[in-house]
Image (cartoon, rainbow, N blue to C red):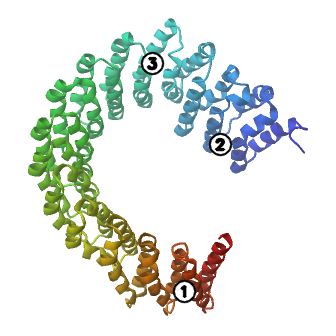
Amino acid sequence: MSMVDEPLYPIAVLIDELKNEDIQLRLNSIRRLSTIARALGEERTRKELIPFLSENNDDDDEVLLAMAEELGVFIPYVGGEEHANVLLTPLETLCTVEETCVRDKAVESLCRIGSQMRESDLVDSFIPLVKRLAAGEWFTARVSACGLFHIAYPSAPDMLKTELRSMYSQLCQDDMPMVRRAAATNLGKFAATVEAAHLKTDIMSMFEDLTQDDQDSVRLLAVESCAALGKLLEPQDCVAHILPVIVNFSQDKSWRVRYMVANQLYELCEAVGPEPTRTDLVPAYVRLLRDNEAEVRIAAAGKVTKFCRILDPELAIQHILPCVKELSSDSSQHVRSALASVIMGMAPVLGKDATIEQLLPIFLSLLKDEFPDVRLNIISKLDQVNQVIGIDLLSQSLLPAIVELAEDRHWRVRLAIIEYIPLLASQLGVGFFDDKLGALCMQWLQDKVYSIREAAANNLKRLAEEFGPEWAMQHIVPQVLDMVTNPHYLYRMTVLQAISLLAPVMGSDITCSKLLPVIVNATKDRVPNIKFNVAKVLQSMIPIVDQSVVEKTIRPSLVELSEDPDVDVRFFANQALQSIDNVMMSS
């Protein structure tokens, strides 16, 4: 039965499925709404489908969530933006349900629809909807209303704008904390649409109400509005209205509020200008760095580099560095970890002398930290310090620590060091690298952890690319080939992997003369896992070597492997032979 022949069919099926007890059927039906709307056509969608959805009182949140999402992209199916207002009714109902994620999705869809509606429709349909929700008896409606004001406000006439501002002010003083939280969350968005004249009066009075709220969950959301409002106000107004609030918040009795301040403070520095930053915000930040709650110190430590970038280097050295020294030996490993992840970025800000005198000892103490994450975070950002202090000093002071970490008992730390080696190699140069780090790179090929061995093989390839095939021929290839007789098959596998990665870098001649004989020899290995990996390596060498070598050396080895008793060895050998045939045919 085709949908075109029977226009009643889709809506009937939809109704049946939406009333079905099986939730999956109901969900599938909702997810196919756009298909059903296309089959019905725009007019019938407006007159039958949307009213039906408005009356649909499904009690399952998953179905309602899917419906809220679908309706957000439904404007094309109801006849374009001139008919967009028909979608408001079902979404208004969804804005009042109890489940938060359904309400949030309905508000998101309403915002999307509202931003595409004509101005006259906004005034006639959208603004009345916002007013109804804002005056709703049940708190869920009022919570949803807060997220819609920034869409409704710009197109409202002056009289309505005054009314909307007054309604938002009432929501900021609502009896229910959930409503005040929603008002605090959306204040920045709403403020961005309000005229400058009302910003200083109406919006700031709402902001002050929220900052003095007795619930810390409301106050901490007001902190988020500080940065948004700070960007909208002139610097002098920002200093008069926002700065005192932030300074108070940095001493708030609730650690959650102080945590939010620690996260947001650096954004405010740009809004208030250099002088108030120096006199008010630096002391507030220092307090947060020395807060008695570890979570606040973590947030403050994580922003230390961003904060220092805004300050003069002298100020940072005078006020922030003493705190950084204290944090580097903090009792909480998470604080030290947060500091280690950003402290390297301070080097370019403070300059060479201060980095050598003040920061380098802190780096070294963090590199020896007992907690692996702290060491990892320092290692991964070493290049930022190198740019400031130069490689000679870096190698003298940090290289012993790096060599020590290369044998760290935590494999993730060893892995981070390996990944950092090619960068270190390019910065140190060949001579220095050979003396200090060459032996380490070979040692990792025999690590107990597979991820380390794999990374070590990749590392050799990257070093060969960095220093060139001649260097690799002298310093890498002989040591790798010596390991092919290792009694443990897993280490022999690593050698095969290293050879397959090195072959493309070394080029055809070295591959044929040095690498290929070793691989061919490995076809006689007693372990099937080695043999089928040999087949894979031989396949990877086909494009690198000449056709004559393929026929003379590679094909006979693969033919021998294709007759092996082990099924996997035969499979990979045949796959490689197939690959040779394909190359022959294409050439």
* Label 3 or label 1, whichever comes before in sequence order: 3
Residue picked out by circle 3: 193
Q: Quadrant of the C terminus?
A: bottom right
* Label 3 or label 2, whichever comes before in sequence order: 2
Residue picked out by circle 2: 63
Q: Nearer the viewer, mark 2 or mark 1?
A: 1
Quarter occupied by residue 337: bottom left
Label 1's element?
A: helix
Instruction: Identify which residue is drawn at 52% across, 38% down.
Output: 100
Residue picked out by circle 1: 553
Q: Is residue 432 visible?
A: yes
Q: Are marks 2 and 1 in contact (CB under 8 Å)?
A: no
Which residue appears farthest toward the top when viewing the image? 159
Name the spot of residue 581 as percent of width and height, x first: 66, 77
The amino acid on which the numbered mark 3 sits, given as a three-letter code, is Thr
Name the spot of residue 86 as percent of width and height, x first: 69, 23
Label 2's element?
A: helix
The amino acid on which the numbered mark 2 sits, given as a three-letter code, is Val
Instruction: Identify which residue is drawn at 14% across, 27% down.
Output: 279
Cα–Cα gap, marks 2 and 1: 64 Å
Q: Is residue 365 visible?
A: no
Label 3's element?
A: helix
Q: As drawn, is 73 to the left or to the right of 430?
A: right
